[in-house]
Image (spheres, grey):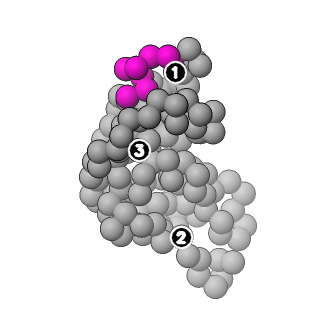
Amino acid sequence: MRLLTHNMLSSNIKGVANGFPLLIEVEKVIEKQVDFNPDFLKNIFPKIEWQALVQASRSMGYAELPEESPESSMLDSDDFLRKFHHALLELHLEEGALVCPETGRKFPVNKGIPNMLLHEDEV
């Protein structure tokens, strides 16, 4: 599961007010090479919740992103875009879990696929 996907997921358990961002428990991370596309990165940047991305990338062992949300002028920096690209698209959570920040409910991630199905009592 890419961090791009993680940045768009939240816990939908009944009664949860804010199930975002899901915490990541890592068992196995892999890196998959993806073609660098600066135009895509510039277009997706405004849609990304920056703090969630930074927290997720650090939990996966990647600490190259700045803590504070970069200014739009950083989108002209090839160095920044490559770091953003690597965190967003090339880091994959292969095995582990996503954890609801309110309830602690764990959603398993197996072979890179998160299982976000809820139990009957959670709907």
- Measured as percent of width and height from the top left, residue 30 is found at 27, 52
Residue lying at 49% horizontally and 60% vertically, measured from the top left: 99
Quarter of the image where one finds residue 12:
bottom right
Residue located beneath label 2 in the image: 116
Can residue 101 be spotted in the picture?
Answer: no
Q: Are marks 2 and 3 in contact (CB under 8 Å)?
A: no
Dividing the picture into quarters, in which one does residue 83 lie? top left
Q: Which residue is mark 3?
A: 89
Where residue 55 sits in the image (x, y, percent)?
46, 40
Q: Earlier in the sequence, mark 2 or mark 3?
A: 3
* Residue 80 among those drawn in magenta: yes
Q: Position of residue 50 (x, y in %)?
A: 55, 34
- Cβ–Cβ under 8 Å for marks 1 and 3: no
Q: Residue at x 40, y 20 (%)?
A: 78
Q: What kind of element bears circle 2?
A: loop
**Residue drawn at the location 57% of the way across and 56% of the way down:** 9
Q: What span is colored magenta in the figure?
A: 74-82
Is 83 colored magenta in this rendering?
no
Residue plotted at (37% across, 63% down)? 112
The reply, left or right, for residue 57 in relation to residue 102 is left
* First along the sequence among labels 1 and 3: 1
Q: Which mark is residue 121?
A: none
Q: Which residue is mark 1?
A: 75
Instruction: Classify residue 6 as left or right of residue 29.
Output: right
Identified by mark 2, the residue type is Met
C-alpha gap between disc 2 and disc 3: 21 Å
Residue at mark 2 to residue at mark 1: CA–CA distance: 33 Å
Outermost residue, bottom side: 120
